[in-house]
Amino acid sequence: MHELIPINYEREIPTVSARDLYGFLGLEPGNYSRWSQQNILNNPYASEDTDYSVFFTHEENPLGGRPTTDYALTIDFSKKLCMISKSKKGEEIRDYFIEVEKEHTAQKFNLPTDYLSALKVLVVSEEAKAKLLSENSAQKERIAILEPKAEFFDAVADSKTAIDMSRAAKVLDMGIGRNELFAFLRDKEVLMGDNVPYQAYVDRGYFRTVEQKYSRPDGSIHISIKTLVYQKGLDYIRRLYQKEKGGFSLVAAN
């Protein structure tokens, strides 16, 4: 397309110089200042930074005086000024702006201009759509598997029942047994060397301890302390282990 008037594409949206537009419209020479005041600055339907912006063509005027003022007009606003001119030139440049906008939009969005290109775009689009559907299906299957585990944990989280460490290892379903769980919690200084929880974790409502009496072969009676885990503690252990291993695990019913 033959260029009728320079268009600046360096801004976020294409613009046209008001002086260039004035010259192309063939308006009365020497009347630019009055025209710009009336049609741009004092136009009740135009606003700065939306329809136009002010700029200077050079820092200093070689002939002295003020710098030369110009206006960067949006294409839409330029079309309105062309219509106001009510001239053949105005209609010509307005039609030109319309065609330029169509080409610019096509380039911006890489719209195909022939059948083969359009077919390639369609194939890529369908492949992307199929991939997305496959990913969504896989995600739904994953959610379906994990939901019962999450629902179980939500159900037991508010329970006041405490379970022993053997049962806790099964419920947590993290791939470790009772002894490994004890060792892990000792390593993290949650439990002391005798597998009794530190008081801070008891105060948080994670654990409780119970005394158990047992008899030795000689008939003597002794007392052992057994550690029990509340459901609130199960969640803490799960998160602690998950952080340590960098894995993903949900509490599950066994």
Image (tube, rainbow, N blue to C red):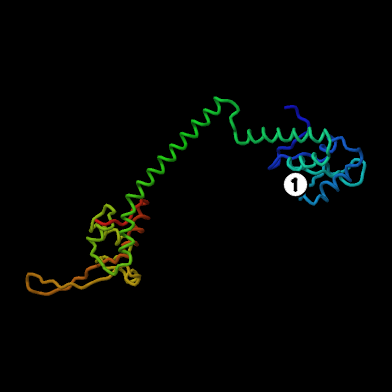
Kindly identify the residue that appears in the image at 23 percent across and 61 percent down. 167
103 sits left or right of 62 in the view: left
- Residue 251, located in which quarter of the rendered image? bottom left
212 sits left or right of 131 in the view: left
The N terminus sits in image quarter: top right
Q: Quick check: 102 above or below 199?
A: above
- Residue 26, located in which quarter of the rendered image? top right
Residue 104 at x, y = what percent? Answer: 67, 34
54 or 169, which is in the foreground? 54
21 or 89, which is in the foreground? 89
Residue 68 at x, y = what percent? Answer: 86, 43
The C terminus sits in image quarter: bottom left
Q: Quick check: 206 above or below 117?
A: below
Residue type, mark 1 in image:
Asp
Q: Quick check: 77 above or below 254?
A: above
Kindly identify the residue that appears in the image at 20 percent across and 73 percent down. 211
